[in-house]
Image: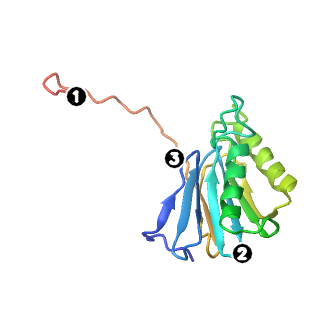
């Protein structure tokens, strides 16, 4: 069971990745249409998480980790540099929701890219929770391989929020 009060919990933001073999470390991310891959070498108890926004490669050849191609390569290479064996790498995939009602198609494209990457690279897909219309919170222990996913609640707003009047005597800066 992952300890949610863990002072070693580290959030992985958009365009970031983290790698750890610390038994106390938990990596976490909040996803909408983005994808997080949790990747692990079970023999070394070494793993990591990324968080990418867009599928494929950076069209400007900028090699931005905001794109899946670069993010997945960087995560894989970070694990290999720390001694992981490519043939032992396990992957879990999360995210890719259509949070804006499917208007952009980014979530679906991210899901397709992530599946294709894992298959093409020959990694073992241990699990996934992709698609849908709700965001997710993912928690991953690289040391144990435990993963917890929770769907974000959707709270409808019944009426528009009124603007708060500002007094002319108050200076905003």
Residue at horizontal 55%, vertical 60%? 28
Please identify the quadrant where the N terminus is shown. Answer: bottom right
In the displayed structure, 26 sits above or below 144; it is above
Please identify the quadrant where the C terminus is shown. Answer: top left
Q: Quadrant of residue 67?
A: top right
Q: Which mark is residue 42?
A: 2
Q: CA distance from mark 2 to mark 1?
A: 53 Å
- Residue tagged 3: 155
Q: Residue furthest top?
A: 168
Residue 57 position in % (x across, y down)? 73, 38
Judge the density around disc 1: few (<14), some (14-19), many (≥20) Cα neighbours within 10 Å: few
On the picture, is 88 further left or further right than 95? right
For label 3, the SS is: loop
Residue 126 position in % (x across, y down)? 77, 67
Residue 103 position in % (x across, y down)? 69, 31
Judge the density around disc 3: few (<14), some (14-19), many (≥20) Cα neighbours within 10 Å: few
Q: Which mark is residue 172?
A: 1
**Residue 37 seen in the figure:** no
Q: Are marks 2 and 3 in contact (CB under 8 Å)?
A: no
Residue at horizontal 67%, vertical 45%? 133
Residue at horizontal 59%, vertical 72%? 21
**Residue 153 seen in the figure:** yes
Mark 2 or 1: the one toward you: 2
Nearer-N-terminus badge (2/1): 2
User: Which one is in front, 128 or 100?
Assistant: 128
Judge the density around disc 2: few (<14), some (14-19), many (≥20) Cα neighbours within 10 Å: some
Residue 125 position in % (x across, y down)? 80, 63
Nearer-N-terminus badge (3/1): 3
In this picture the colour scheme is: rainbow
Q: CA distance from mark 3 to mark 1?
A: 30 Å
Mark 3 or 1: the one toward you: 1
């Amino acid at each position: 069971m992952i300890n949610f009060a863990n002072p070693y919990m580290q959030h992985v933001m958009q365009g970031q990745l983290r790698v750890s073999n610390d038994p106390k470390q938990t990596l976490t991310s909040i996803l909408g249409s983005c994808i997080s891959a949790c990747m692990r070498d079970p023999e070394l108890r070494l793993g990591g998480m990324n968080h990418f926004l867009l599928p494929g490669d950076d069209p400007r050849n900028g090699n931005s980790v905001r794109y899946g191609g670069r993010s997945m390569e960087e995560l894989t290479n970070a694990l290999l540099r720390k001694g992981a064996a490519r043939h032992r790498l396990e992957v879990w995939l999360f995210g890719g929701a259509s949070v804006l009602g499917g208007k952009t198609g980014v979530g679906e494209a991210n899901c397709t890219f992530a599946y294709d990457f894992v298959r093409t690279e020959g990694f073992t897909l241990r699990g996934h929770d992709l698609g849908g219309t709700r965001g997710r919170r993912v928690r991953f222990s690289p040391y144990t391989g435990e993963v917890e996913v929770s769907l974000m609640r959707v709270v409808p707003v019944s009426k528009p929020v009124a603007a708060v009047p500002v007094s002319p005597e108050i200076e905003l800066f």
